[in-house]
Amino acid sequence: MIAIVGSGAFGTALACALGHQQDVLLWGRGLAPNARETLRLPGVSLPDQVRIVPMLHDAAQAEVILLAVPMKALAATVASLPKTNAPLIACCKGIDPNTLLGPSALIENVRPTACVGVLTGPSFAVDIAAGLPTALTLAMSDNQTDPRTVKMVQQHLSGPTLRIYRSVDVVGAELGGALKNVLAIAAGAVIGAGLGQSAQAALLTRGFGELSQIARASGAQAETLMGLSGMGDLMLTAFSSSSRNYRFGLALGEGSGFDENTTVEGVATAGAVAALARQHGLDLPVLEMTQRLISGTETATTAVAALMARPLKEE
């Protein structure tokens, strides 16, 4: 049995996909015990094997707990969970702007002895909920986790529409999932400003190189960044109008408004990336310009002009 903590779009989508093959406990703030739909995925019905539980501590009954809450709520949510031997798997993407930690380290700060992992990769909630084929990465450290536990979690999360790949590179999986959101904002801004797809392709290529630099400096493996949680997630997020980060960037480039109630993960992450770059002494012009674009100190046009005017060098 799996417990999913968080009834947002992604948590609900996972409940839909996994609830067709096993018992699932779903907890979310304000979620009625008899509800079969949630506000985040209207029109999507929960399978019969999904049971909505009224109390967060009910999640401790499960063999695996998926934490599908935003980064800003992750530590507090974990602190509210009762002690359990179930693996705690973070399903959020980002870097905490105060501590510069990823989801797994935030969990470990609260629960030092917990078995921790992350679930990440190219996925839109609507696709998962609709039963469309999706492949994700489950990253759990081989230094802290029994391989049998990792395989157990993988089996619980896999099914006819979800294919889960194992990885021991937690840092690489987390940074790939977090930094691609920043690049997706930049990709949307280029198109919104009317600078063309050639400029977008150049920016994403150079930006992915910067993503790789900061990830390797943080201890990530290069091959992880070329996989689902890195390149795969970037391809999905940076080219689709279904991506909130892309749409936010598009609005920045156009100079139009954006719904302030919509969570855009890349906004908070951009500032954290700038701090990480300084920490590692890295020059990351694309990511830096994206941060300045988000903060309003640059426009898409002036940011690209500044990048084009940088000294010439080898690729």
Image: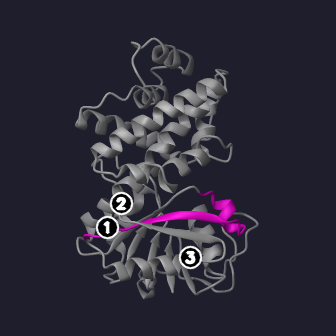
Q: Is residue 311 left or right of residue 187?
A: left
Does the magenta portion include 128?
Answer: yes
- Residue under pointer 2: 170
In the picture, which quadrant includes the C terminus?
A: top left
Give me the C-alpha separation between circle 2 and circle 1.
6 Å
Give me the C-alpha separation between circle 2 and circle 3.
19 Å
> Which image quarter: residue 252?
top right
Colour scheme of the picture: one colour
Tell me if residue 247 comes above or below residue 153 in the rendering: above
Name the residue rendered at 48%, 24% in the picture.
296
Amino acid type indicated by mark 1: Ser
- Residue under pointer 3: 158
Tag 2 near tag 1, CB within 8 Å: yes
**Can you tell which mark lies on residue 141?**
1
* Earlier sequence position, callout 2 versus callout 3: 3
* Earlier sequence position, callout 1 versus callout 3: 1
* Earlier sequence position, callout 2 versus callout 1: 1
Q: Is residue 51 left or right of residue 312?
A: right
Amino acid type indicated by mark 2: Val
Name the residue rendered at 69%, 81% in the picture.
47
Name the residue rendered at 59%, 86% in the picture.
22
Chain part drawn in magenta:
123-143
> Which image quarter: residue 7?
bottom right
* Label 2: which secondary element: helix
**Can you tell which mark lies on residue 132?**
none
Does the magenta portion include 278?
Answer: no
Relative image position of residue 233 (x, y in whole percent): 54, 50
Tell me if residue 252 comes above or below residue 174 in the rendering: above
Residue 304 visible at all: yes
